[in-house]
Amino acid sequence: SSASDNVSALEKAFGDAILETVEFRGEKTVVTDRSKAREVLRHCKDSLGYDYLLDICSLDHFGEDPRFEVVYELYALDNGACPACCIE
């Protein structure tokens, strides 16, 4: 399945916990509520086939709320689907 299909599956499975989805230059990003982050990431691994964590980083949005953001960039070795999952 494609990254677009997987984003739709996450929206269906987690509803309001998916705060935003963004596409930029062909890369899909899912922004999720921090209270559901572990559950969303586990679902990506167990149900959607994401088996490789490419990168993890944090952003400091000084002066904004929420101030910090953590980005997990996931990859599926079988099909090359590669969304980023941002946790606010």
Image (cartoon, helix red, strand yellow):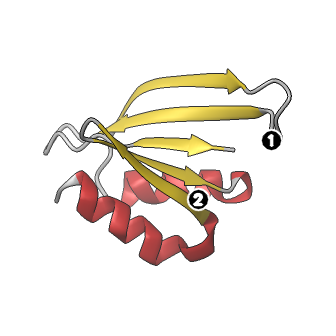
Contact (Cβ within 8 Å) of mark 2 with mark 1: no
For this view, does 65 lie left or right of residue 43?
Answer: right
Q: Position of residue 71 (x, y in %)?
A: 55, 33
Q: Position of residue 28 (x, y in %)?
A: 35, 46
Q: Residue at x 18, y 55 (%)?
A: 2
For this view, does 19 lie left or right of residue 22?
Answer: right
Q: Circle 1 is placed at which residue position?
A: 66
In terms of image quadrants, where is residue 84? top left
Q: Residue at x 31, y 61 (%)?
A: 6
* First-in-chain label (2 vs 1): 2
Q: Residue at x 66, y 59 (%)?
A: 36
Above or below for 28 versus 46: above
Q: Position of residue 27 (x, y in %)?
A: 30, 39
Question: Please, what secondary structure does the residue beneath circle 2 have?
Answer: helix
- Whether residue 29 appears in this view of the structure is yes
**Front one among 22 and 7:** 22
Instruction: Mark 2 vs mark 1: give the one in front.
Output: 1
Above or below for 22 versus 68: below
- Whether residue 47 appears in this view of the structure is no
Q: Residue at x 50, y 34 (%)?
A: 72
Question: Please, what secondary structure does the residue beneath circle 1 have?
Answer: loop
For this view, does 29 lie left or right of residue 17?
Answer: left
Q: Circle 2 is placed at which residue position?
A: 39
Q: Position of residue 29 (x, y in %)?
A: 43, 45
Above or below for 42 versus 26: below
CA–CA distance in space, label 2 to label 1 = 20 Å
Q: Amino acid at mark 2?
A: Glu
Q: Amino acid at mark 1?
A: Pro
**Front one among 42 and 20:** 20
Q: Residues within 10 Å of mark 2 (few under 14, many from 20)?
A: few
In terms of image quadrants, where is residue 88? top right
